[in-house]
Image: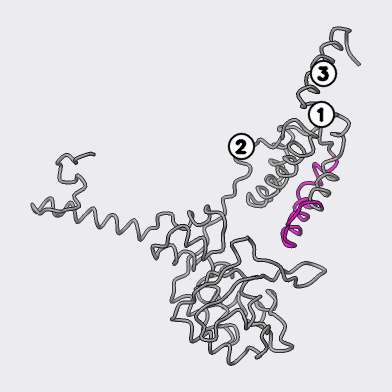
Amino acid sequence: MFASKRAAEQWLSVTETQIIKGEWIDPERAKVTLGSYADQWITQRPGLRPRTVELYRWLLRKHIEADLGGVELGKLSTAIVRQWRADRLAAGVSESVTAKAYRLLRAVLTTAVDEDKILQRNPCRVRGADRENPAERPILTVPQVFDLAGRMPERFRALVLLAAFASLRWGEVSALRRCDVAEDGSWVRISRALVEVPGRGLIVGPPKSRAGVRTLIVPAAIRRDVVKHLDAFVKPDHDAFLFTGERAGNPVRRPNFSQRTKWTEVVTKMGLKGLHFHDLRHAGNIWASKAGTSTKDLMARMGHDDMRAALIYQRATSDADERIADRLSKLVDKHRTGGTDDDDDGLSGQPVPVG
């Protein structure tokens, strides 16, 4: 096993030091294969939503197990992970999906390092591999949303308007019941979401995040549409679903909604080919951010407990940049005409007092 007695003594010395420091890892435990360990990781992970479990298992089966599933944890290295990522991209897998698979792999191996003490170091150290660069989604205008709502069957008009003007996800808007909406249409309460799980159908669960439980004020401009919908399409029962198919009163499912509304055909005719339903929520978030909303308030309306998403929506926009440029131009014009400005920012050429 060892080339010499001295080598064996050095190994023993290092091992004893690791044991004393609590850093020693039994190499036998690292012989478990990645596929087996990752499958167990998903099963034992607490608090995962059904849709998340479905996504993780799909990523594991489709993008990780084929190349890395049979590799022992102890034999994984950054070079192996880097090559696996490169092979995925070369096979035509999108950058977005590859990044999701990489983040799952990293999370699994982080548990192997931090909690189970199987590995000393996480081999997922490929710089930039966790980043997605999705294409910019279209930003709908208010007239476009009303145009789209007007092209929907009447029973789905309010669904489109609420998704946009209340920034609702599909699972949230499809789970709404009569008891979740004010009689005058002035507010909606989000307390649950519907998730489609293969083999199990629609499952009622919590919103996507803890902050997803919220009550939202509905803009006055669409309250009449909400009330009209309540009167025409919602049963009087307290727990009657707000949006259903024509029969049975069951909640409308995503594929059925797309089919009944001819969504793809409609958005293509509008010049919005490829528009996703989620783009309605995206538009609502953009409008809210432009209304001078604070980060905290925007997070509350969006149902996010992480401020990163809110900050993305609050990034500088082209119209805001135009207003800044116009303001700067006015200051220059005043300087050139000899005028004064109480808010002079140094464009006059005079030093600006500091302190």
Q: Amino acid at mark 2?
A: Arg
Residue 111 horizontal/vertical position (percent): 75, 41
Bin the neighbour count of mark 2 within 10 Å (Cα to Cα): few under 14, some 14-19, many 20 and up: few
Q: Which residue is mark 2?
A: 127
Asked if the stretch drawn in magenta spans residue 50, the answer is yes
Q: Is residue 162 above or below residue 132?
A: below
Bin the neighbour count of mark 3 within 10 Å (Cα to Cα): few under 14, some 14-19, many 20 and up: some
Q: Earlier in the sequence, mark 1 or mark 2?
A: 1
Q: Are marks 1 and 3 in contact (CB under 8 Å)?
A: no
Residue 200 horizontal/vertical position (percent): 81, 70
Bin the neighbour count of mark 1 within 10 Å (Cα to Cα): few under 14, some 14-19, many 20 and up: some
Picture residue at 84% right of the left edge, 36% below the top: 72
- SS under mark 1: loop
Q: Main secondary structure of the magenta part?
A: helix
Q: Which residues are magenta?
A: 44-70
Q: Which residue is mark 3?
A: 16
- SS under mark 3: helix
Q: Are marks 1 and 2 in contact (CB under 8 Å)?
A: no
> Which numbered dot is residue 25?
1
Q: Is residue 306 above or below residue 105?
A: below
Asked if the stretch drawn in magenta spans residue 160, the answer is no
